[in-house]
Image (cartoon, rainbow, N blue to C red):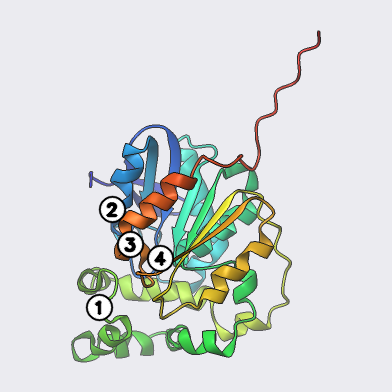
Amino acid sequence: MTQKRTVHVNGVDIAYVDEGEGDPVILLHGFPDSSYLWRHQIPALVEGGFRVVAPDLRGFGDSGKPQEIEAYGMQTIVNDVVALTMQLGIKRPHVVGHDWGAAIAWMYAFLMPRRLDHLAVLSVGHPGVFATPSIEQRMASWYMLFYQFPGVSEELLRRNGWRLFKEIMGRDGDYDRYLRDLARPGALTAGLNWYRANRSPASELRPARPFPPVLAPTLGIWGAGDKALLEEGMSGSGKFVKGPWRYERVEDAGHWLPLDAPDEVNKLLLGFLGTERPAHEERRPRRRL
């Protein structure tokens, strides 16, 4: 991958990869990844005629790592993405997200419908489905509760050579790289603060707010071997999408779809992005005869 660049937006330094020419695609990673997650997708999308921008979201990779929990609210991170696109002269990108990046992509679609062309979400379904999780989903995502204890979570995850963290992660994703990334100053707290800011038990007590329908053509992809997120979260997301909706289940993949099934993910993205009618087409006035 090419050298990362850095831009200061929304009070934080954001590192990003910017490759190719053509219609822009923004790739948003999750926990505990960075833009490196997309190393198989970037060349394929560039070859397919797209300009690809893949940031290290705040708290991860080479980007800034504020230590305050409130610095990781969803709207703040969406604002990072919007500010980055504006700095790069991108008006209406395709947005692709995985894990927390998918949650940010959904939120981007709610807040910035006219600054979105196509939406593709991997692993994480619409927050309206996750607002009332089944007991099976609560059991699968038990770690979100464990991450809620500042200081305690960090200490237990690091203890005995990161044994507990290794047991939680297994040999999934870039498991050997995560320890190096999370050992950076402030990195572990920054990553866990995503959960503390957005998935605390107290957040379930807040009055549910209605989500505006997603107008963009939307593709949802879920891996059949995902241990953290059940299929119901993605398969039930279509009822929140007013634009064209496609759901694809990938049998031979777990949670880390871009790594587990890179060829399949690339094929799905290349076959989807730019092929449906955009959410908001530029309407030219008709010429009078």
The answer to which of marks 4 and 1 sits earlier in the sequence is 4
Distance from the alpha carbon under mark 1 to that under mark 3: 15 Å
Distance from the alpha carbon under mark 4 to that under mark 1: 17 Å
Q: Name the amino acid, label 4.
A: Gly
Residue at image mark 2: 40
Q: Dot 3, crowdedness within 10 Å: few (<14), some or many (≥20)?
A: some
Q: Is residue 199 above or below residue 278?
A: below
Rendering quarter of residue 250: bottom left
Residue at 28%, 87% (x, y): give it. 167
The answer to which of marks 3 and 2 sits earlier in the sequence is 2
Q: Position of residue 247 (x, y in %)?
A: 54, 61
Residue at image mark 3: 261
Q: Dot 2, crowdedness within 10 Å: few (<14), some or many (≥20)?
A: some
Distance from the alpha carbon under mark 3 to that under mark 2: 10 Å
Q: Nearer the viewer, mark 2 or mark 4?
A: 2
Residue 20 is left or right of residue 26, and the answer is left
Q: Secondary structure at mark 3?
A: loop
Distance from the alpha carbon under mark 1 to that under mark 2: 19 Å
- Front residue of 160/92: it is 92
Residue 171 numbered mark, or none? 1
Q: Nearer the viewer, mark 3 or mark 2?
A: 3
The answer to which of marks 2 and 4 sits earlier in the sequence is 4
The answer to which of marks 1 and 3 sits earlier in the sequence is 1
Q: Dot 1, crowdedness within 10 Å: few (<14), some or many (≥20)?
A: few
Q: Nearer the viewer, mark 4 or mark 1?
A: 1
Residue 289 is left or right of residue 124, and the answer is right
Residue 30 numbered mark, or none? 4
